[in-house]
Amino acid sequence: MFSLPIRIYWEDTDAGGVVYHANYVAYLERARSEWMRTLGHGQGALRAGEDLVFAVRAMAMDFLKPARLDDALEVSVVLRQCRKASAVFVQEVRRGDEVLLTAQVRVAALDAAGFRPRAIPQALYEQLKSLEVPSP
């Protein structure tokens, strides 16, 4: 499992002093992007070298507890399923041992030029497939 640390700043919070719900989408995206980067596949390089981008196709989130100003969070990424042109990730946002949010995110592989579905390049597909963690 990959985990990205996130600190909560004023700009992340709403009038009630808690993280605004839409900001969690950005945290999840950052964690997936950094996970790919640790595998050697930055998004810019995938776009330029492979004509490949990933776009969110579907997302389900459960907001369990609020995050607040100055909280130190961890955003995790687990690849649950990899198919030829899509992938499903399971993600969590935690504050220590507390789970604040759970999410399932399906991304589609698209050609960068026309945003049409395409296959994930074979070498990347094989790498991702080897990292797949089946449901318990």
Image (cartoon, helix red, strand yellow):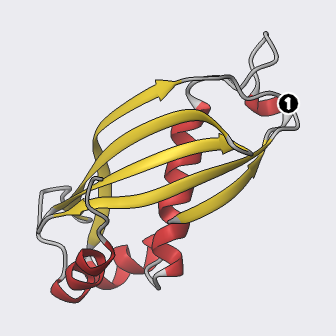
> Measured from the top left, where is residue 38 in percent x and y?
53, 79
**121 versus 28 height, above or below:** below
**36 with respect to 22 (left or right):** left
**14 versus 114 height, above or below:** above
Label 1 sits on a secondary structure element that is loop
**85 with respect to 42 (left or right):** left
Identified at 47% across, 85% down, the residue is: 40
* Among the 4 quarters of the image, the one containing residue 94: top right
> Measured from the top left, where is residue 91 in percent x and y?
46, 48
The amino acid type of the residue labelled 1 equals Leu
Residue identifier under label 1: 69
**17 with respect to 65 (left or right):** right
For this rendering, which residue is in front, 115 or 100? 100
Identified at 64% across, 23% down, the residue is: 65
Identified at 50% across, 51% down, the residue is: 29
For this rendering, which residue is in front, 74 or 18? 74
Identified at 64% across, 60% down, the residue is: 4
* Among the 4 quarters of the image, the one containing residue 78: bottom left
* Among the 4 quarters of the image, the one containing residue 134: bottom left
